[in-house]
Image: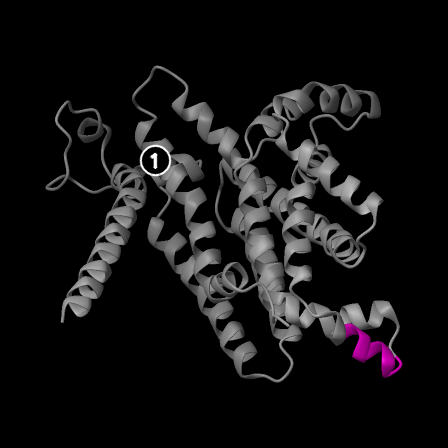
């Protein structure tokens, strides 16, 4: 009886702590979302207005669109239509034997939607900053994961001294403050003529985040039994074929988990973008321009921008949460 009471008390304590953590984590986003649909007069009041305030879409309209008369219902219908097409493709992919054509269709639909959006609606420059964020994030993830997979696999299977040195150097490079690399990147980019471009931002972010991807993917590869690839090689596959067809399918949870963390690091980057880009900003830098002044008229606009930049990340995390939990919890099949 006493053990059951202790177990129940422990369960209640854990759940209570989780609820408190969720509330603390959710309050800032809830506050920003609330401010994003308020009038400025309600935002700047000395006493916070938590309910009973008038709702408006003007902050989103001012941040994203040039026309103050832009109908937000038209925008909502466009987004809902795009979401319906993507949902249909995702539903078909889950029920198909081969998912890659449907996944390619999702990516193509998103690309077409981003191309059509500024043609259908008269957008502000901030939409270009959002496109820059997507472009930089996608390229950074693709390049970082591509290099990290090969490097992590090699370092997991090779236990020599040079491998240990590479890992230590990568860890030391990651541990150094980012401010130590800003000026060298700026000078090199200026000499190469690629300053203020997406290319230099992608290269800088790949270099900064690559040690993280190598270490994380190596830890996942360490959990994959060598016997799996050895069995594939005994059946006639080369090491590269065994890596691609036998090891990578087992590694998907780890790859997705690492990709999500790399995506967050690239998507939210501020320092390198601010220093290396004068006009080709990403959305975090554009938002800081709204909150850095003394005027209070841009507070609701900054809140709308914060909610807008957060929603895509929330959607991606929700879509891949199952793989993320598997990747962080297990990594791969253990031998």
Which color scheme does this rendered protein use?
A: one colour
Q: Residue at x 41, y 44 (%)?
A: 308
- Image spot of residue 196 (x, y percent): 69, 27
Front residue of 221/99: it is 221
Instruction: Sort mark 1 into few (<14), some (14-19) or many (20+) by Cα contacts within 10 Å.
Output: many
Q: Residue furthest top?
A: 294
User: Could you tell me if residue 67 is visible in this image?
Assistant: no
Front residue of 60/324: it is 324
- Image spot of residue 138 (x, y percent): 63, 50
Answer left or right for 131 relative to 304: right
Residue range corresponding to the magenta coloring: 229-236
Answer left or right for 110 relative to 71: right
Answer left or right for 319 relative to 195: left
Instruction: Indicate whether 85 appears above or below 58.
Output: below
Q: Residue furthest left?
A: 52
Front residue of 246/225: it is 225
Q: Quadrant of residue 309?
A: top left
The overriding secondary structure of the stretch rendered in magenta is helix
- Image spot of residue 91 (x, y percent): 49, 77
Q: Residue at x 53, y 34 (%)?
A: 125
Q: Secondary structure at mark 1?
A: helix
Front residue of 250/131: it is 250
Residue under label 1, please give it.
Answer: 303
User: Could you tell me if residue 227 is visible in this image?
Assistant: yes
- Image spot of residue 225 (x, y percent): 70, 70
Membership of 233 in magenta stretch? yes
Answer left or right for 99 relative to 10: right
Membership of 214 in magenta stretch? no
Instruction: Indicate whether 50 appears above or below 103.
Output: above
Q: Quadrant of the C terminus?
A: bottom right
Q: Quadrant of the N terminus?
A: bottom left
């Amino acid at each position: 009886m006493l053990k059951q009471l202790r177990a129940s008390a422990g369960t209640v304590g854990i759940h209570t702590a989780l609820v408190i953590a969720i509330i603390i984590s959710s309050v800032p986003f809830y506050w920003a979302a609330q401010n994003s649909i308020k009038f400025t007069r309600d935002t700047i009041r000395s006493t916070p207005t938590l309910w009973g305030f008038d709702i408006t879409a003007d902050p989103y309209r001012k941040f994203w669109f040039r026309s103050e008369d832009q109908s937000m219902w038209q925008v909502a219908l466009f987004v809902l239509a795009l979401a319906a097409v993507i949902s249909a493709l995702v539903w078909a992919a889950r029920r198909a034997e081969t998912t890659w054509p449907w996944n390619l269709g999702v990516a193509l639909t998103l690309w077409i939607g981003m191309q059509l959006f500024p043609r259908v609606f008269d957008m502000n420059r901030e939409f270009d900053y959002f496109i820059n964020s997507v472009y930089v994030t996608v390229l950074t993830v693709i390049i970082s994961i591509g290099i990290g997979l090969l490097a992590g696999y090699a370092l997991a299977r090779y236990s020599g001294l040079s491998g240990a040195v590479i890992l230590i150097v990568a860890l030391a490079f990651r541990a150094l403050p980012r401010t130590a690399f800003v000026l060298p990147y700026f000078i090199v980019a200026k000499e190469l003529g690629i300053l203020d471009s997406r290319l230099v931002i992608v290269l800088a972010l790949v270099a900064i985040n690559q040690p993280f991807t190598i270490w994380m993917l190596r830890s996942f590869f360490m959990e994959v039994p060598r016997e799996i690839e050895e069995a594939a090689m005994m059946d006639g596959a080369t090491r590269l074929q065994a890596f691609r067809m036998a090891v990578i399918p087992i590694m998907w949870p780890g790859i997705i988990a690492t990709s999500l963390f790399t995506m967050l690091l690239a998507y939210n980057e501020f320092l390198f973008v601010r220093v290396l880009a004068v006009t080709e900003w990403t959305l975090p830098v554009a938002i800081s321009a709204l909150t850095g002044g003394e005027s209070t008229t841009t507070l609701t606009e900054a809140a709308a921008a914060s909610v807008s930049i957060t929603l895509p990340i929330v959607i991606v995390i929700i879509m891949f949460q199952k793989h993320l939990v598997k990747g962080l919890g297990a990594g791969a099949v253990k031998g």
